[in-house]
Image: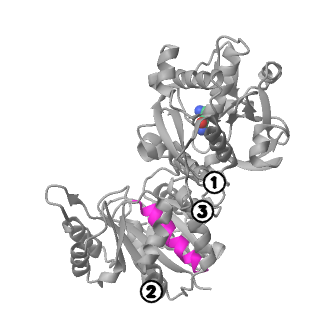
Amino acid sequence: MQTKYVVVLGSLLSGLGKGILTASMGKILSFYGHKVLPVKFDGYLNYDCGTMNPFRHGEVFVLDDKSEVDMDFGTYERFLNIEMDSMSSITGGKLFSDIIAKERKGDFLGTDVQIVPHLTSYILEKINAIAKAKQPEIMLIEVGGTVGDIENSYFIEAMRQLSNTEKVVFVTITYVPELESVGEQKTKPTQIALRQLMQVGVMPDFIVSRSSKPLSENAKSKLALYSSLPESNIIDDHDSDNIYKLPLHLMEQGFGKMLAEKLDVSSTPDKKAIRDWLSTVDGKRNRRVRISIVGKYVALKDAYASLKEAFSHAGMANHANVELKWVESENLENKKASDIAAALKDSDGILVPGGFGKRGIEGMINAIEYARNNKIPFLGICLGMQLMAVEYARNVCMLKGANSTEFDKSARYKIIDLMEDQKHIKYKGGTMRLGSWPLKIKKGTLTYEAYGKQLVNERHRHRFEFNNRYRAIMEKRGLVISGTTPDNMLVENIEWKGSFGIGTQAHPELKSRPQSPAPLFVSFIGSAIKYGGIRH
Ligand code: GLN
């Protein structure tokens, strides 16, 4: 079978939702019964996302195979309900390190190695290798950044070359702003972007237009005129409160059918698959529940992208609208109990997410103490679980000075500590406990109730662990160790007795999808609804 390609390019600015568009096109093609595979190119020179700052770049997503990838992979997996692997992630860093290694080996003896043709040919080789290994009918290649960036120029050139020999459909996403004072949608930025695209030898087959309101007929005909495309190929993708409905919105405009025609593949929809998707993502919501997220990256919501989505899925499963309140943990430090209560008083549930570094830690611990004392449903993710253990050690086991050695190397009670095999690690890239790990769950616990089985797999990304030296004393004082690695060597899940409080060393949000929501989130929202959810 000959793989066909859809190449998705961005224009004007990033953050338009290119990943959501790519995933939505994949979803439509899978509604038509085709096997699709997303591939993402990122132009930065980092080997992977693992060493990036979530505050600048958004969340670092982790795949089963331990790779640390761009957050768009989360979107692909959530829409398509598939497990991806590192083969789909091509970065500038990987390409350059490979090409230099090849040069040192002598693969290019006698030649001066150049971006074109050597690097571009290497990209085509890689694409070919993915097609061979994974055999998708359609590969959706999303090019990170926007046309005109130096970082992705050679990759776009490789895609142009790909279209010389293979069936390639180019889709570009653009932004049509509306000036409030004029009340008119402006197409001039896109006109300029189109010129840029043509300069690099690419003519888009479709233009998908992002705007705040539906694209006006006038704007659509202007875009058609300047791109020499029929109006039907200018597709509206205006703001929506539910990203999961985008595939259907695109289909309503005939985009799916046109895309399939261009690719020369069938477009007979699996009506049941579409109905199932729609009933999952757009089902009835007759409850409202309010969750406070107490973390340190709250100013940039992209830093917690999967978390937000996991709540959305758990809301779907519980027929509830989940309202998230983002609380900056630093603001809960050195505060009186009454101030903390005031900041968190409207919460039906409290969550402390994952994170790194000392800033805001004590504020998170204060929030956990407040949740435990007031029996407010609590979920601690990774760092949140570690701090749940620290709080319990300090305030229930009376181990004053308990901490994680990440924040206090000489803590009196090192409740959370580095494992021996982490102590000698010097290189930071790709050396945490990463990827999918089996979790053995103890029967009769909240965690067991949530999963309904004893052995599951969850994804991890952390360096520090619960210190086994404190297991016995913490258990004696009522902390429940509800999950461990199957060899019982590492504590994975802990719980309170008497109220809903679970901490997990994993990141269950990374595996949550509309069609298979993360069990711990579903349970957490369920108990938050019981605690205070409002019917409406
Ligand atoms: N900083 C902690 C660790 O490295 C927690 C990491 C996380 O929350 N992902 O173990």
Q: Quadrant of ligand 1?
A: top right
Q: Position of residue 388 (x, y in %)?
A: 65, 27
Q: Position of residue 98 (x, y in %)?
A: 54, 60
Q: Which mark is residue 280?
A: 3
From the viewer's side, name the closer residue of 475 and 73.
475
Apparent side of residue 521 relative to residue 397 in the rendered image (left or right) = left
Q: Which mark is residue 262?
A: 2
Point out the stretch of residues depicted in magenta: 17-33
From the viewer's side, name the closer residue of 464 and 36.
36
Apparent side of residue 501 relative to residue 107 in the rendered image (left or right) = right
Q: Position of residue 117 (x, y in %)?
A: 42, 73
From the viewer's side, name the closer residue of 368 and 153.
368
Which circle's residue, 2 or 1, is located before the other in the chain?
2
SS of the residue under disc 1: helix
Magenta-colored stretch includes residue 102? no
> Could you tell me how far apart the alpha carbons at marks 2 and 1 are, in whole angstroms?
37 Å
Apparent side of residue 66 relative to residue 230 in the rendered image (left or right) = right
Query: Is there any visible trace of residue 239 in the rendered image?
Result: yes
Residue type at numbered disc 3: Thr
Outermost residue to the front? 536
In the depicted structure, whether residue 303 falls above or below residue 257: above
Q: Which one is closest to the eye, mark 2 or mark 1? A: 1
Residue type at numbered disc 2: Lys
In the depicted structure, whether residue 387 falls above or below residue 113: above
